[in-house]
Amino acid sequence: MLVLVSAVAAVILLLSAFGGSGATTTAPLTSSSTQLLPAGPPQPEIVAKIGSLHLQLPVNQSRVTAIGYAGGSDGALALDPLGRQANEGLIKRLVHGLVGGSTVGPRWYQLSGGASGTTSALDVGAPSGTDVYAPVDGTIVAIDRVILNGRRFGSTIQIEPTGAPSLAVDISHVRLDPSLVVGSTVAAGATHLGQLLDFSRAERQALARYTNDSGNHVVIEVHPAATLQSP
């Protein structure tokens, strides 16, 4: 058994050194990426689930810098990440080497902080100005301003998912597309919600540890619909 564990550990270390089969969605972007032409909608890619609800990638794959999960705001529900945790500890890596783990989906990072469970906030990193698209099909039920230190930092867009009216999906760190209003219907990966905002002056962003920039990102949370309030 000791020989087998040692062999698995050696394989894991080699994979860490030379890379694995992780998805391209987590490849870091250089600073010049912000000068690219608009990339358009993302290809359909599910990155997280909660029950029967699937959350799709909200930005084009070519713009993703890293994907992370952290504790969300009060009442946010735990999400089930797809893919493999890129910064898991050695023991977990050994266990996954022995019994196998998820290989479907992007590589993601566990981040610190937050008021709820450790996977209740999905952070999808991308350069500021990147176009953001709806992660689910549904209807916008609320649009709230985000105020930090007396300044407005975009909006939180709340979507009631089609087929899951007991839940609400919140998307924040976004400058709202002016064509959207409460009652607008949205389609996953197709409806433009707005542009990703630069939050680097508002807060220290944990995702920056795993990117080549300041760690700007879209935040997605799922709440029970009953806890939401209309503006």
Image (spheres, rainbow, N blue to C red):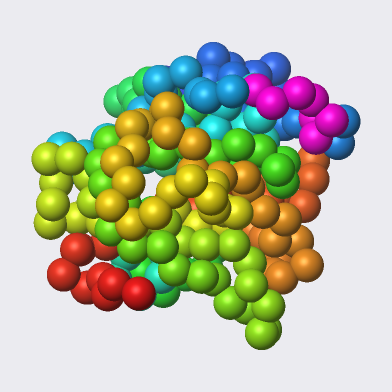
| Identity of the residue drawn at 51% across and 23% down | 42
Percent position of residue 3, x then y: 45, 21
Q: Which residues are magenta?
A: 33-39
Tell me if residue 114 can be seen. yes
In the shown orientation, is residue 150 left or right of residue 47? Answer: right
In the shown orientation, is residue 33 left or right of residue 120? Answer: right
Residue 225 in which image quadrant: bottom left
| Identity of the residue drawn at 33% across and 38% down | 186
Q: Please tell me whether residue 105 belongs to the stretch shown in magenta.
A: no
Percent position of residue 74, x then y: 35, 75
In the shown orientation, is residue 205 left or right of residue 163? Answer: right
Residue 96 in which image quadrant: top left
Residue 31 in which image quadrant: top right
Seen from the viewer's position, the closer of residues 175 and 82 is 175
Seen from the viewer's position, the closer of residues 185 and 110 is 185
Q: Residue furthest right?
A: 32
| Identity of the residue drawn at 71% across and 70% down | 202
Q: Which quadrant of the rendered structure holds the C terminus?
A: bottom left
Q: Is residue 26 above or below residue 115?
A: above
Q: Is residue 73 above or below residue 132?
A: below
In the shown orientation, is residue 34 left or right of residue 12? Answer: right
Q: Is residue 15 above or below residue 219?
A: above
| Identity of the residue drawn at 44% across and 48% down | 180
Seen from the viewer's position, the closer of residues 52 and 19 is 52
